[in-house]
Image (cartoon, grey):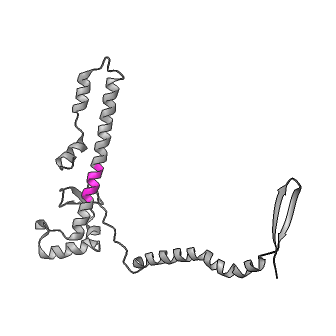
Amino acid sequence: MMLGVYTASFGPGGFQARRAGRGTAAAEQATPRSLVMQLLPLIILFGFSLLSALPNLFSTPPVPDPRFAFQGSTRYSTQRETGGLGIRYFVNQAEFQKHPVIGTELAREGAKASSASLKTRGPALQKFEDSVDKVYVQDKYTQCQRGVDRKNRLKENEIGLFGIGTDWEKVKKIEEEPIESCEELKRLHVL
């Protein structure tokens, strides 16, 4: 069966339709091959995505870190201190000891020495405590930035547009006002 190809055009004479009779048999023969050629990019994309997913199919999913808080509460009642910056943090002791990686390290280290004299930390606990340090420093840095911004706004409001009639003693007092989070970062030698 031969399908015809029609062309249509609009012009000064109105609507005209013509049949293009040549080349229709060649177009029908090329259809199966052109279909494969059209699908080839999708096949290649699917193949690459399958290859990139293969390593994840055979590896174990990462274990999330235990939860912690910087303030003690009924849930987070066991106080600990990081080995890096010496940041105090609180954990739920039962959850902490049941953690599949850190709990195992703590049990292994606990068998070697008493918990009071425990100065060495396993790699998983050290990595966890490094993340605790990082979260603490980021939190204090954010608080410090907010404090600096607040001080600048107070100072600008006190000075006004041209500084006419400004109480410079009050401006000096605002500048000398310490920002607790910035002082903490200085104490940790981070700022």
With respect to residue 114, does 33 lie above or below? below
Q: Over which residues does the magenta segment extend?
A: 132-139
Position of the N terminus, as image quadrant, is bottom right
Q: Left of 168 or right of it: where is 23?
A: right
Q: Left of 182 or right of it: where is 8?
A: right
Q: Residue 20's quadrant in the figure?
A: bottom right
In the foreground, 148 or 63: 148
With respect to residue 70, does 109 lie above or below? below
Total residue callouts = 0
With respect to residue 156, does 136 lie above or below? below
Residue positioned 31% across, 17% down in the render: 165
In the foreground, 112 or 72: 112
Taking the view exactly as shown, the residue that stands out farthest to the front is 22
With respect to residue 55, does 182 lie above or below? above
Residue positioned 20% across, 43% down in the render: 183
Taking the view exactly as shown, the residue that stands out farthest to the top is 165
Residue 171: say if magenta.
no
Spot occupied by residue 77 in the image (x, y as percentages of width and height)? 25, 60
Examine the residues drawn in magenta and state their main secondary structure. Answer: helix
Residue positioned 29% across, 38% down in the render: 148
Spot occupied by residue 6 in the image (x, y as percentages of width and height)? 82, 68
Residue positioned 36% across, 23% down in the render: 161
Q: Left of 82 or right of it: where is 8?
A: right
Spot occupied by residue 50 in the image (x, y as percentages of width and height)? 48, 77
Q: Residue 55's quadrant in the figure?
A: bottom left
Residue 136: say if magenta.
yes
Q: Residue 93's quadrant in the figure?
A: bottom left
Spot occupied by residue 151 in the image (x, y as percentages of width and height)? 30, 34
